[in-house]
Amino acid sequence: MSDRRRTPRPTKRHPWLRPAGANRADATPRPAPGPPRGEPAAAADGTPSEADERSVVDAAVYRDGRRVGTPVSLAATYRRLREETGAMAWIGLYRPSEAELLSLAEEFDLHKLAIEDAMEAHQRPKLERYGETLFVVLRAARYLDAPEEVDFGELHVFVGPDFVITVRHGAAPDLSAVRARMESTPELLALGPEAVLYAILDAVVDGYAPVVSGVQNDIDEIETEVFRGDPEVSRRIYELSREMVEFQRATRPLVGMLHGLMAGFDKYGTDEELQRYLRDVADHVTHTSERVDGFRSALSDILAVNATLVTQQQNAEMRALAEAGFEQNEEVKKISAWAAILFAPTLVGTIYGMNFTHMPELDWVWGYPFAILLMAVVCVSLYVIFKRRGWL
């Protein structure tokens, strides 16, 4: 196993990082790692292992801001970095295996707690220092137009004196665009791993802008649906409110993280250009965090207004049903009253229409006038009674 010795860049200290030697003396060589546990070693010609092909999105070695090597595996990246004096490795991984993370930990002296976090994912945004290495957890977001949803991704970044390792656990952010941007500006990439960290932070924060615009459009549509009485709007408000809770968890910690980085500008001698860039990113994060807070407040107000409108609509419907029931009851009373009035002459006429031979009063001269008078008296009496009771 060959010894590994690296010559530090003579013109640049690494801001945000503790001075070299905090955990490892500069003169202490790093041993070259053996094959990662649980997977075969890469071939001597640099052929990638099966695990590397699965999760290594891109691996490159840079010197003075320019790519000098594109290894095809982790083992080849380690070898090329040892061979290049004053170089930096940028390794991009997507949902790596445990063996790959352990290999990286052995090669770059990554803390086991940070490796555990990278394996588990589902971490809150944070920034932690482990000796010479920074461990940064970011929550990226993107707006999906078709389902009108916010999709969140998780990104872990290890930043050391001569390496940057990114571990993605979601589709966002698009780090290939970040790498292309940095490679197109070698003077910025030449500032080292801290410049790469800035570019990643900037990409994550810039990715929030389309989300903010999409959410604003959703809220405008929801307001229209609320006053239009859409019955499905309550569900949409609830789902968007949950997404805003997640969005708030992604953006709010970034404000403190960036202010922590800015607080170390003087201590670690951060390049002035990077200072300006980071202040700009911090301003954008603060603005986004304030917008998200405003969205949550607006959604709470909209939900309250919607509840009030729904209650008013329900009261109006109940009042309409009550009025309809009252009117129906009035009609029933009128029908019942007239049925009773018409029943009286029908009863008298039915009795006198039976035509029995020995029926009393059948041969009476005043029988017919008496029957008519009886019908009239009964009908008038019933009419007067029902009229006084308000049935007619």
Image (cartoon, helix red, strand yellow):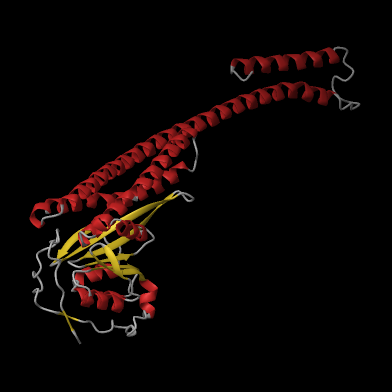
Q: Which of 176/365 is in front?
A: 176
Q: Quadrant of residue 16?
A: bottom left
Q: How many marks?
A: 0
Q: Quadrant of the C terminus?
A: top right
Instruction: Decide if residue 314 is in sight here.
Output: yes
Question: Is 115 left, or right, of 362 in this rendering?
Answer: left
Question: Is 388 left, or right, of 339 in this rendering?
Answer: left
Question: Is 48 left, or right, of 273 in this rendering?
Answer: right
**Picture layout, residue 313 above or below residue 344:** below
Q: Quadrant of the N terminus?
A: bottom left
Instruction: Decide if residue 124 is in sight here.
Output: no
Q: Quadrant of residue 111?
A: bottom left
Q: Which of 226/22 is in front?
A: 22
The image position of residue 272, as x and y in percent, is: 16, 50
The image position of residue 288, as x and y in percent, is: 29, 44
Q: Which of 119/175 is in front?
A: 175
User: At 49% across and 50% down in the image, what residue appears?
Assistant: 146
The image position of residue 339, as x and y in percent, is: 71, 25
Going by the picture, which residue comes out furthest to the bottom?
Answer: 1
User: At 70% across and 14% down in the image, what residue appears?
Assistant: 380
**Picture layout, residue 238 above or below residue 327:** below
The image position of residue 260, as x and y in percent, is: 15, 53
User: At 81% across and 15% down in the image, what residue appears?
Assistant: 372
Q: Which of 71/300 is in front?
A: 71
**Picture layout, residue 31 above or below residue 387:** below
